[in-house]
Image (cartoon, rainbow, N blue to C red):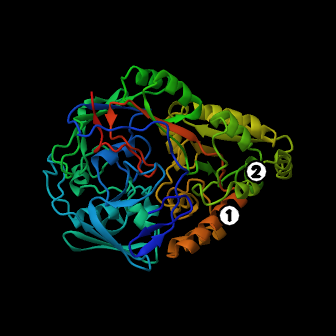
Amino acid sequence: MFRKPWMMAPALWLAVACSAPQQGTPVAVDQAAPTPRYGGVLNVPVSNDPTNWDMTISKSVPNSYGAAMAYGTLLTYKTGPGIDYNEGILAAKLAERWEVATDARTFIFHLRKGVKFADTPPLNRRELTAADVKWSYEYGSRTGEFQDKSLPPSEYNFMFEGVDRIETPDRYTVAVHFKTPFAPFINYAGADWNVIMPPELYGLEGKLQDNLLGIGPYRLNKEASQKGTRWVFHKEPNYWEDGKPYLDQVRWLVITDDATENAAFQARQIDLLQDVASGSAEDVKRANSNAMALQYQTGYPRMVALNHRKPPLNDVRIRRALALSIDRDELNKVMEKGKGEWQMPAVFTGYFTQDEIRKLMPYNPAEAKRLVTEAGYPDGVPVEIQYAGLTEGQAFVTMLELMQTQVKKGGINLEMKNTERSTYTRNLRVANFEFIIRSGSTQRWDPDGALAYFDPKASRNWSGTDDPALTEIIETQRREADPTKRRELIRKAAARVVEQAHSLGFYTEALTHFWHPYVKNYYRNWNLSGINVADVWVDK
């Protein structure tokens, strides 16, 4: 387990390097009822409709929330009483135990017996077997039977970098073999993107995009759902964890703006608020004095894509000028009321001290202006930034507007382009952009997930980064089984990202979760995309 940002995560025979965000601060303590109550509905706000249930193609919110409810993973991360928001403690789930070879090339998982899929056709409550894991992992890595099927690249193929073969020596044992040591994999086995899916679901239409049914505590009710309004999930009566889930339904209510969402929470039309920015958290607390709250800082970097394939950001001088022009102290003061800290790109909080970060990422608009002029733009260089304003939220747009003013001093004329979410996502994947920042991040579980954004072989290398020196470090840290040595390699890789301005560092966000007191046993953990819906009940 790891309990502080600088500690490592042991997994039986092997210690693998991980890191976690800073301490979450409980503003109030939830006193759960001693005995769970069955029944009731949990109303959860989502800012947009799900677009695709195939986790290998689209993992954005709320798609990943739905997969976490309907599917399952071999391992998971603990959450609950006594587990801090930032702790990353691996725990058994569909696998009751696991083994990792000392050279980090073989990972063996022993499945629980008697675990059943949903009782709905085509699954019909059949038992989970090692064959399902093999199928899911080969589909997720586009190996084995899926190697030559001309499928879209898997967005989490980085979790299986260098996989050789997946074997099933018996009905309940899975062995994942890698060609070379791949230390991050044990942490990826707990990632709730890396779900176990039933082959029959794929067999219905030759795809997974439109169906969501598996081994999880809830199932999607398509008939009761309405795009743009609500998505309804019903309790799975034969869920494998005895006595769970407690709720009859989980409803997603599509609410596209913060003001409406806050009003709905105050009126108790929704039962919780997630990731409320520091600028709004005090207002929410004043309007909901009895609400439970958990405040924390993000410990993972934003996903920043600077397109290396075409001018102007194919020039390292322009990328460096952009980095030098960002006043992170001002951003932190305005956006986070000074509660955040400077943040490196490509690595979790805790790998570098604040002094180290400030030395690596100085604020120097005069030097930025010199670089822009040297690159052939004496009157300033235009750079277009795309964003999906409707789903990112007003706070994110405000941050961009402030940054637009800042980088002007360095000779960067930042042109903001608001696009519809699906267009924005498509443009990212086909490299039809210059500069994109995602408000949140998806680099949980292991630092390798963040570094994969810069690996030329990874499908998520949207920037088109191809830096041989950086690639060598990324590959070396994956093969390094010694946690101390691996940690230093991760630091070296992150420093290289800053040096070449392959990405940009900003600041940590101070966010707050709120929920009404009648929502019981509600916990959050940064390693889990969704809510611990199997454990929650409502007492009203």
Classify the position of the C terminus by image quarter: top left
In the picture, measured across the screen, residue 468 lies left or right of residue 299, that is: right
- Looking at the image, the residue that sits furthest to the bottom is 103
**Residue underneath mark 1:** 496
Observer able to see residue 368? yes
Q: Tag 2, which secondary structure?
A: helix
In this view, 326 is above or below 44: below
The answer to whether mark 2 and mark 1 are in CB contact below 8 A is no
3D distance between C-alphas at marks 2 and 1: 16 Å
- Could you tell me residue 279's position as x and y percent? 59, 30
- Could you tell me residue 1's position as x and y percent? 44, 63
In this view, 57 is above or below 186: above
In the picture, measured across the screen, residue 157 lies left or right of residue 457, that is: left
Badge 2: residue crowd in 10 Å (few <14, some 14–19, many ≥20) = many
In the picture, measured across the screen, residue 496 lies left or right of residue 369, that is: left
Q: Amino acid under label 1? A: Arg
Badge 1: residue crowd in 10 Å (few <14, some 14–19, many ≥20) = some
> Going from the N terminus, do you reach mark 2 or mark 1 first?
2
- Could you tell me residue 65's position as x and y percent? 37, 43
- In terms of depth relative to the viewer, which is nearer, 240 or 414? 240
Identity of the residue drawn at 55% across and 34% down: 277
- Could you tell me residue 156's position as x and y percent? 43, 58
In this view, 131 is above or below 293: below
Q: Tag 1, which secondary structure?
A: helix
Observer able to see residue 273? no
Q: Amino acid under label 2? A: Ile
Which disc, if any, is residue 173?
none
Identity of the residue drawn at 38% across and 57% down: 151
Which disc, if any, is residue 318?
2
